[in-house]
Image (cartoon, rainbow, N blue to C red):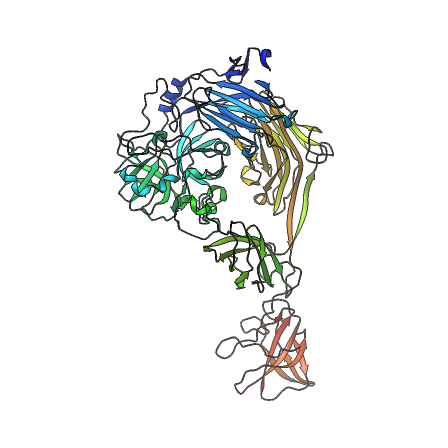
Amino acid sequence: MRGADLRRAIMAVGAVLFVVGTAAAEVPVVELPAPDVAAAMEEDARTPRGVRPFRVGLPRKTDISPDRAAAWRDLQGGGKLWTVSVRSPGALWLVLGFGTFRPLPGAELRVMDPSRTHVLGPYTHRDIRPHGQLWLPPLPGDTAVIELLWPAELAGKRANLHLGTVSHGYRPWGGIGGPGPGDTEPEAGSCNIDINCPLGADWQDDKRGVVNLLSGGSGYCSGSLIATTAADCRNLVLTAHHCLSTAGEAASTTFQFNFERPQCGSGSGRTDQTVTGSTLVATYAPSDFTLLELDVDPPESYNVYYNGWSRSSTPASASWCIHHPNNDEKSISRNLDPLVDGRAWGPDHWRVTEWEDGTTEPGSSGSPLFDPDHRIVGQLHGGTASCTSHTYDEFGKLSVSWTGGGTPSTRLSDWLDPAGTGAVTQDGIDASFCRVPRPRLVYDGHVVDDSAGNGNGVADPGETFVLEVDSRNTGTLGATHVQGTLSTSTPDATVTDPAADWPDIPEGTVRRSLPPHFTVELAPTHPCGDPIAFTLDMTALEDPGSWTSDFEVPVGTASTNEEFRDDMEQGPNGWTTQSLTGSNDWVQTTADSSSPSHSWFVSDIGSVSDSVLVMPLLTSLPERSVLRFQHRMNSESGYDGGVLEYSADGGPWQDAGPLIVSGGYTATISTSYGSPLAGREAWSGDYGGWTEVEVDLATLAGSDVRFRWRFATDESVSDEGWYIDDVVVESTSYTCNTPPALPGEASDPAGPGRPFTVTPDPGGYRLEWSEPPGGGPVVDYVLYRTDLRGFYDPACEANLGAGTSAVLPDLPADHGLLVVARNGAGEGPYGRGSDGTPRGASSAPCP
């Protein structure tokens, strides 16, 4: 629509009625009906602590994009400006959630209040996130003006932008928005103690890591930046599982820094230090933790701090909590009693029996609990403490979260101790530490030199090989005097030469270790195909610390076997489709594909549907199998989306999400608009192109497995849909060139065979012995003589052949005789002396 062509219209979209009109400056206005705030507050009052985050906003589904609403205005120079005004009457603030945000270079998005007092942006192509969403921090007031600048060089190209959610703020958050109508509830209780009061004097570093969270423009909690043993200032935030636990919630979260009163009990905290968007790293309900990683670095001006931690299971003698009670300015609480095991949520939690100073309130959930050494030992789950109730709070134990559910996505250890150093504690780190130029050395590859073995360039069982290791300097300063130590946790591998040097490694470059590198012995009994796990610790003159990298070296020569492949060019080819709800079938199409011209496609329609694309059955799935496929999705983000499911041996369909190792789910499907996948993690939104998904099928080995791609839509708003192409299942097998094991002892006294005997024979002397009871296969036997006068030095007497008897015409006088088995790996044992110790091998073995 443009200028005078704008017409007043009423559009029903889902549960929200839009009134689109024209403002004085011919800016289209999309007005949302006022929500029932009183009903929301009544529901909030019934919500117990520790179950879900408390609310301050009501997200509303919208359908606003340059393709569907608002006007383009011509600018001088040939550019255009797209403008729309969104109003939710009575809102204290608005949060805008763009489910699709993929602007082209040169385009700029700004969002502001009508007076332009508060302006968010500009947001450009540099703000595109992997999940394709962009959520903005709260904008004060009930009206947001959206402007998209589209320069002349982008004329004729599509503005890939869609506003799918607008949240109506009905209570203040983080100091944004005044008290709303009928909101008589105070923000934080009077017994809370500002972080800048005397009690917080020793916690001025730690406070800079504590953040105020707002997820989906609705629920609020606290959290903290947390350090890693790599001291890399990775932007990890620890909060509570009950606050948020899905990829969609993570993408929609705003993090507010330094919201605190400047003086004890007076002044107003600044509200503008925010970053938005994060990725879900790990979460675990039993200890109520969630770990997030910010999508963008906090600006240097935020002066952030990464708090330390302790995973000790010993109760702290006292504890402190820094938090945002009722999303108010930052506060501190103190408990002078030892922590005890939780009772409300069990021994996976620490219990503070009561606070001697301060308290916690709704909004404090997820906040860090510190021990006397300023290390996080848990995060707040809930309790009954308040200004009027001097009772308990319980915090999920970091010591339990460390191992969590036993996988990287359910535990902290992989992320807080990425190199597996085994550290029990980690001190906090100031962000300025990471801005000082310093090298950072990481493993970047290896070469196996087994020229002393079979020479095939691959580690095989029974080999001794040289390992040459490449290291990359990812830091900001060159590294000199570089040294490294190699160790292994694989039981039947031994690093016999564990130290190596490197040449100088300038920043941004890769260098290989210097001769003699590292030497590794691998036992013949090592299973073919099982990798060797190594840990490399490196040091350099320019940094007092060290860098640790974990890597694996494959054992055996890998062969890839194709179990299934379909590029969708041969028609249905055994695939089947079904509409479980509604009528929205998968079809083969040439509208888009990964390669070469066909793919499967299902539309994103504006009504409820549930459609599945079922792959042909895979029988007796081999070990070490993976599924890979290409897909492109452009759906209504957070509302319509797809999942991968599987059925093993005819059993029920199960979500394959936990098996996905790359390209995993990106959103949580809304529970508000009737989607058959409501509440589930799924792929949703606009991916901006074809992407690959990889699924580890190791747990399904030996089963007959069927996969299906399932796509569901809700009751309103359509989009493009979902494409699937190039589905491949591959298995990997290994072959090993294993040298034979050494043979055992001939006529072993501990074995069942006969002893070694020498008897007269018409041809001289007859020697008889028995085969070794163990060890590798025998190629032949050799006879050694040794002095009986006390000096043991076996000398070769004869080759006895492959049998277990031989006749010799003569034997040496006054000498003992030994029969020794041998094969390509060498000689077997020489037996034991009278004192029971093994006899040594000959210094001059038989040829």
Q: Is residue 633 above or below residue 315?
A: above
- Regarding residue 386, the answer to whether it shows in the image is yes
Which residue extends farthest right?
Answer: 570
The residue closer to the viewer here, 703 or 317, is 317
The residue closer to the viewer here, 94 or 12, is 94
- Regarding residue 459, the answer to whether it shows in the image is no
Left or right of 297, for residue 425: left
Quadrant location of the N terminus in the rendered image: top right
Left or right of 33, for residue 663: right
The residue closer to the viewer here, 616 or 236, is 236
Q: Is residue 351 above or below residue 464?
A: above
Q: Is residue 41 above or below residue 352?
A: above
Q: Quadrant of residue 676?
A: top right
Q: Position of residue 371 (x, y in %)?
A: 33, 45
Quadrant location of the C terminus in the rendered image: bottom right
Number of marks in the rendered image: 0
Which residue extends farthest bottom?
Answer: 813
Q: Position of residue 415 (x, y in %)?
A: 47, 45
Which residue extends farthest front?
Answer: 76
Identity of the residue drawn at 44% across and 17% down: 35
Q: Position of residue 361 (x, y in %)?
A: 33, 31
Left or right of 187, for residue 299: right
Q: Position of residue 834 (x, y in %)?
A: 50, 79
